[in-house]
Image (cartoon, rainbow, N blue to C red):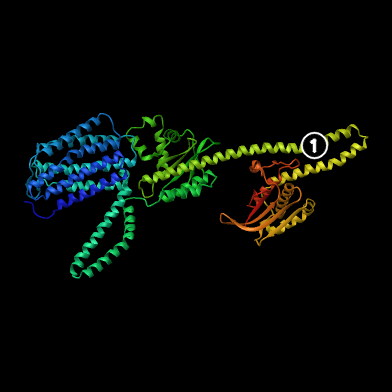
Amino acid sequence: MNQPGIDFYQVQTIISFAGIFILAVITLLKAPGNRLNISAAVFFILVSLWQLDLFIIRGAPSPEVAGITSRTLRPALFFLTPALLSFAILLTKTGGKILYLEKALYITAAAGTLMCVTGFGFKPMIYKPGIGYDAQADLTYLLIIINTAVSVTAAFTVLLRKFFSGDILPMEKKQLQYLMLGVAIGLLGALTNILNIYGVKVFPMAGFLVLVFFALMSYSILAHDLMNIRELFQKTLIYAITSGLIVLIYFIMNALVFSALGDSVYKTFLFFLCTLFIVIGFEPTLKALDKVTRKAFFISSYDYQALLQQVLFKIRFLKDFGEIFTVAGNYVANVLQLENSAFFFWETGRDSFLKYPAGGPPEAPLPINHPLIAYMDIKRDIIYFKKMQDDLAYNAAPRGDYSGIDMPEIVRLLKKYSAEICVPVLINGEVKGIWVIGKKTSKATLLREEVNWIKNIAAQISVILENIILYSQLLKSERYAILGRMSAAVAHEIRNPLTGLNGFVQMVNADRGNADVLDKFLSIAPGEFKRLERLTDNLLALSRTTTVRQEPKDLSKIIDETLDFTSHILRDLNIRVSVNYFPVPKISVETEQIKQLALNIIMNACQAINKDGALDITVSEGRISGRRYVIGEFSDSGPGIDREIYDRVFEPFFTTKAEGTGLGLAISKNIMEAHGGLITLENKEGSGCVVSIFFPIV
């Protein structure tokens, strides 16, 4: 009795079937082991089967075909609304007595399925002009109506309870809004079909309104990341559109060109050209659709892992807290186009939290007992300002985490900074900072991946700050330890000559007429005074950390002048000196300091060799980490450096020599650091040591 062809009603239902079925597959593929995703996929599949049922029976050629189709697919209607309840229970994490109701509804659905299989309570399909084959008001439909009414009421109860609870994020609230609206619209469509079955003359709108349900679900996924499947859904949409374009191109080519050609050779050639152009344009088409759909569906095109690495690269070498906060805050504000981004960080001396706005100096300290600090200390997690406002509006403030906290004061402060979220900065497990993230200038809500990105940055900042604090504490303790050793060494070096001088003074004072004692005192005293003077000069050289009178100089000439000065020592010790000077640029140095540096290195080499050895000196140019340096290398034939003391050779007053002060290498290191260079020591294979000095080429 049905008219041939597909009408508008069937077009709606088949589109709904295809779209919702694809949505079910995507949901399942995203997390196949996740109960929530499985539940949602089952619900979507049952909706799609319902639409397939409507499509087939609408155009069935006979009542027998319509009846068989309905008996086969009608069980989807029995299980559809209990599946909705299961999804709502898992989504809201609801438990208790409602789980017993869920089981009872599934038992009822199983009973209805058995009725369809056996034909018990199932009436044949009837033809209605303008509508096609339709069901009759039989026992199975009565069971469907009861099951639907109970299931939907229970599902909306748990969804609304979650919606108005204090434990829901703004994004979750948006997701529930669209889910409930979509289900309500789909239910309205089902109601029009049921009314028609029971004799009320109204055009069945299930196909169209379920199509609206599909559109709302798609928008909720794309705009608010429902089920966390937005990216996969967007990719599927792109491939679907691309596939449709390819089919359309072939259809047009076949209708306009291929069908007009009789020669198969021409057809094959044109088919090849058409395919070639499609293949060439495939990738650009995908990229264009990706760009358009991301913008249309509020999907960020950023690679947040790469952005995180960029932030870390910018702040990893910073030592000042204010610089770290300013650089990180500015970067995030620029990427996300935020109205505001500010850090509140604990200031030890002032016992308060100072504000570090992006690009500005610290200001407006918060007392350590401010309600925001107290609340963050309880939460230790991201605070959503919108959720907090909703909680207060629903009178949730006296309960739970809000108890005893001056919430209006927190709201006032966060409104001042147009805050959307607050992120804790934890150091050693304690809240030492709060990062206030303002709203976007576009007024759009922060996306899930954007919030996670900010959270990751805050975690990395916490690690960097903790390392800075630990390093400063370690450096401070090391400085105290070095100061103690220096004080002991200086006291020892001064005490020895003073003790000797004091003893001679007492002897001279006790026997003023003894010329031998006086002569011995006068012969020894100048040397001891000279020793004290040398110690004083070394201490002054050690404390000198800046260079003066820098001028372009040839390192080779400075070394030659130092060798001339020490030539008699080298000759007496029978140390052979060989030099190898390569052409190098001049370096900007303070000449006397570099002579002192070269002298220290040469004298150390002489003391290491002791007698009968060799000292090889090379001047060349090299690169370290892409930067050019003039390099001086002093290679001696001594015994080398004991590995056990290798890490202490530059430490002031550390020496293994009986007559040494332990200041030579410490002074040399200070001189090189003052010139922006560095000095290294390395043992040679066999025996000997190489001291290398590196001067940067400006």
Which of the pair 21/89 is nearer the observer?
A: 21
For numbered disc 1, what is the local secondary structure?
A: helix
Identify residue for label 1: 498
> Label 1 neighbourhood size at 10 Å, few (<14), some (14-19), many (20+)?
some
71 on left or right of 174: left
315 on left or right of 681: left
319 on left or right of 214: right
Residue 212 can be seen in this image: yes
Q: Is residue 106 above or below residue 228?
A: above
594 on left or right of 514: left
Residue at left offset 82%, top offset 36%:
500
Residue extending furthest toward the front: 686
- Residue 653 location in percent, x, y? 70, 41
- Residue 408 location in percent, x, y? 39, 35
Residue at left offset 22%, top offset 31%:
101
The quadrant where residue 165 appears:
top left
Q: Is residue 254 above or below residue 196?
A: below
Which of the pair 641/654 is nearer the observer?
A: 641
Which of the pair 603/288 is nearer the observer?
A: 603
Q: Amino acid at mark 1?
A: Leu
- Residue 374 location in percent, x, y? 44, 33
